[in-house]
Image (cartoon, rainbow, N blue to C red):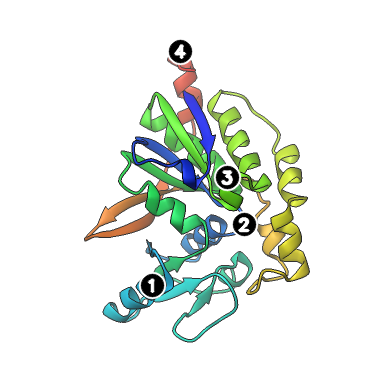
């Protein structure tokens, strides 16, 4: 499977298969939300849209980057979400980069959102799709975020049929500017456990797929076959 890696500015709407990566923290937070029982995550373009969607759907919860503010129920923090019961709930998520990237590819034939915690399952979902090529969208720092690029490379090696140790990729993420910002409190709304929770490779056994539902971009968990990647190579795939 051929692949290319770019940032959100490089997305032009022609991507047929795309993986949007936000390690710190949007798609680590989203994965934890599903683990904690969330039914679906609606992706909002901005804070006003997030609050408008919430207002139209009593019982839905709104989540954003930064410190807690009126109208929003949750912050973009895996450390906070892991302590929150979301069974059966719908979360409306708006973040600085991750949700922006996901919305940019929402009409692709297959659009997945990823971070290290769902990397293995994401690779299996791509193998299941049997696509010829994939675009990895690194959302942080206009495509230059070290943690997102490390995750993209980890995914590329998994798709190539290798069994790479996650250690070197996680180390690049651990020493990234984004990780430093979280540790020092420069990013508001951070939980002390956020960095380490973002550095758990293959923590969950599901991928996360974006689809359009009733005019909204909706993220849902996608279960995959454990042997999907190896099956592609057994057929003579890349």
Disc 2 to disc 3, C-alpha distance: 13 Å
Residue 203 in view, yes or no? no
Q: Quadrant of residue 52?
A: bottom left
Q: Residue at x 48, y 80 (%)?
A: 73
Of 152 and 137, the residue lying toward us: 137
Q: Residue 139 location in percent, x, y? A: 54, 50
| Residue under numbered circle 3 | 143
Residue at disc 3, secondary structure:
helix
Q: Secondary structure at mark 4?
A: loop
* Residue 50, disc: 1
Q: Secondary structure at mark 2?
A: loop
Q: Residues within 10 Å of mark 4 (few under 14, many from 20)?
A: few
Residue occupying image coordinates x 53% and y 28% = 159
C-alpha span from label 3 to label 4: 32 Å
Marker disc for residue 101: none
> Dot 1: within a 10 Å radius of its alpha carbon, few (fewer than 14), some, or many (20 or more) residues?
many
In the displayed structure, 37 sits above or below 97; it is: below
Q: Nearer the viewer, residue 237 or 142?
A: 142
The residue drawn where x is 55% and y is 39% is 120
User: Can you give x and y, in whole percent of width and height, for residue 151 in the image?
Assistant: 61, 41
Q: Earlier in the sequence, mark 1 or mark 2?
A: 2
| Closer to the eye: label 3 or 4 | 3
Q: CA distance from mark 4 to mark 1?
A: 45 Å
Q: Earlier in the sequence, mark 3 or mark 4?
A: 3
**Residue at the disc numbered 4:** 236
The numbered disc on residue 24 is: 2
Q: Earlier in the sequence, mark 2 or mark 3?
A: 2
């Amino acid at each position: 499977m051929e692949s290319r890696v770019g940032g959100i500015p490089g997305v032009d709407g022609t991507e047929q298969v795309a993986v949007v990566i936000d390690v710190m923290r949007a798609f680590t937070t989203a994965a934890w939300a599903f683990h904690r029982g969330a039914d679906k995550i609606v992706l909002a373009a901005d804070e006003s849209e997030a609050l408008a969607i919430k207002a139209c759907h009593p019982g839905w919860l709104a989540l954003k980057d930064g410190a807690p503010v009126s109208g929003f129920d949750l912050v973009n923090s895996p450390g906070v979400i892991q302590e929150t019961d979301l069974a059966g709930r719908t979360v409306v998520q708006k973040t600085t980069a991750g949700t922006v990237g996901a919305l940019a590819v929402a009409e692709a034939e297959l659009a997945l959102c990823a971070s290290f915690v769902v990397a293995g399952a994401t690779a299996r979902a791509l193998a299941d799709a049997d696509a010829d090529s994939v675009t990895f969208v690194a959302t942080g720092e206009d495509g230059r975020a070290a943690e997102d690029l490390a995750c993209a490379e980890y995914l590329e090696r998994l798709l190539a049929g290798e069994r790479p140790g996650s250690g070197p990729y996680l180390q690049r993420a651990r020493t990234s500017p984004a990780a430093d910002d979280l540790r020092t409190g420069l990013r508001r709304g951070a939980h002390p456990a956020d960095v380490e929770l973002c550095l758990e490779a293959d923590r969950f056994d599901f991928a996360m797929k974006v689809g359009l539902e009733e005019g909204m971009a909706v993220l849902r968990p996608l279960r995959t076959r454990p042997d999907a990647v190896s099956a592609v190579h057994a057929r003579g795939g890349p």
